[in-house]
Image (spheres, rainbow, N blue to C red):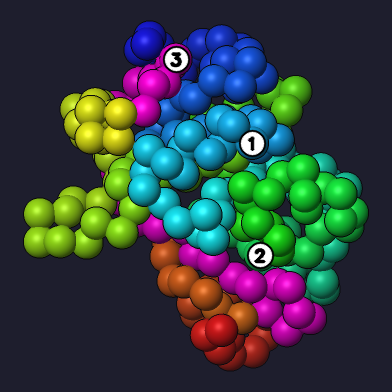
Amino acid sequence: MRVTSPNELDTAARAIEAGELIIVPTQRWYMICTDASNGDACDTIFTGKRRPSTKSLAYVAPSLTACEEHFQLSDEARKLAKMFWPGDLALLLPWRNPEDAARYAAVGSPALTTVAPGFLGELAARSNVPVAATTANISGDAGPDDRGPAVTLDEVQAFLTTSDLTVSIIVDGGVCPTANHMTIIDCFTPEAKLVRTGLVHQRAVAATLGREVRAS
């Protein structure tokens, strides 16, 4: 395992393409990433995180244009994407091709999709394979001592010790400042619905769509 700087973007992208696991910083917290089409690598993440297979990893698209090649975007989904991407918003989107849904099973159908800012977004743009990502923490641990996903390198190391996951690269981004989730919107149907609140406020979503947004 190597700890690298954000300047070593190509090294991180090549590791993803090789089917390895890496951990990268975001403004929110550290994320564990791999090739979204590599079922074995994705399964390793599910197992290490104790994450239910029904709780999808995120598909990190390099751009809205690239996203539209694989997914169907309703009018409301496109409005949200244009307003908040790259950013801290994820959309549940239907695949254009059923074969893609099977190939990228780890990110679900509909797929949890985002265009991310910062290093994670640059990684997706530089990689020749699609990037799957999730937070660096054990799933479902909401006990009194649970501090949530890792926001420092020390917390990343603690997560790796607990999960027994092997990663090839950790990108050192210092301290992740916001320690909050992405907002998730279900855009599988024409009328978008709120799944989870996060850094993109519900009022901002409502203002973009010009209507109140109900929880799904």
Residue at 49% in and 64% down: 183
Q: Which residue is mark 2?
A: 92
Image location of residue 186, percent across then percent down: 64, 73
Q: Majority secondary structure of the magenta segment?
A: loop
43 inside magenta stretch: no
Q: Which residue is mark 3?
A: 168
Front tag of 1 and 3: 1
Q: Which residues are magenta?
A: 165-192
Residue at 38% in and 9% down: 2
Q: Give the label on residue 24, or none.
A: none
Type of amino acid at the residue the image marks with label 2: Leu
Secondary structure beneath dot 2 equals strand
Residue 83 visible here: no
Front-lying residue, 12 or 116:
12
Image location of residue 170, percent across then percent down: 39, 20
Front tag of 3 and 2: 3
Q: Are marks 1 and 3 in contact (CB under 8 Å)?
A: no
Front-lying residue, 70 or 179:
70
Type of amino acid at the residue the image marks with label 1: Gly
